[in-house]
Image: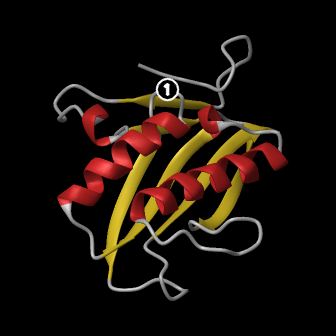
Amino acid sequence: MGQSSDSSKTPTVVLTNPKGLFDPAPYGFSHVAQVAPGTRLVFLAGQGGEHETGALEPDFRLQVRQAFMNIRTALESVGAGVGDVAKLTMLVVDHTEEKLRIIGPELDAAWNGRMKPTCTLIPVPRLALDGMLFEVEAIAVLPA
């Protein structure tokens, strides 16, 4: 199981789930991301549920959806797509399994059903802004 952003070019990121580890697909991540030699790393700052105006959605699901849209916008700004992402780190205020059940489908929609990158979810008591409930940062890999 591997993936790159475009099957006609040499993959910059290969995602795998080795035998002997549980299937992480229902939880929206992969266990291993291999980065090809001669590539460049692109680091995206944490994105929350803010719109371009800075307005923050009050609802957790809407913040998650907007944060993933913001990640896609940042990726597009450097000529990348979700298939170029090797690693996500998600920060969730007062995390619960109910919130995880919201994140999974939103991530799947943002990734258009593609294999998800490696991911770490970190429960936190608070984020940078009042009312901010979710933040996600990404590391993408592009040809040099």
Q: Residue 48 appears at what percent x and percent y?
A: 57, 68
Q: Residue 69 appears at what percent x and percent y?
A: 63, 50
Residue at the spot 35% in from the left edge and 40% down from the top edge: 28
In the picture, residue 47 is in which quadrant?
bottom right
Residue at the spot 65% in from the left edge and 46% down from the top edge: 140
Residue at the top extreme, as displayed: 8
In the picture, residue 29 is in which quadrant?
top left
Q: Nearer the viewer, residue 52 or 41?
A: 52
The amino acid type, in three-letter code, at marker 1 is Arg
Q: Is residue 43 above or below residue 95?
A: above
The residue beneath circle 1 is: 114
Quarter of the image where the C terminus is located: top right
Residue at the spot 66% in from the left edge and 31% down from the top edge: 12
In the picture, residue 85 is in which quadrant?
top right
Q: Residue 68 appears at what percent x and percent y?
A: 57, 51
Q: Is residue 46 left or right of residue 132?
A: right
How is colour applied across the structure in the image? secondary structure
Q: Nearer the viewer, residue 75 or 143?
A: 75
Residue at the spot 43% in from the left edge and 73% down from the top edge: 133
Q: Nearer the viewer, residue 9 or 114?
A: 114
Tell me the SS state at disc 1. loop
Quarter of the image where the N terminus is located: top left
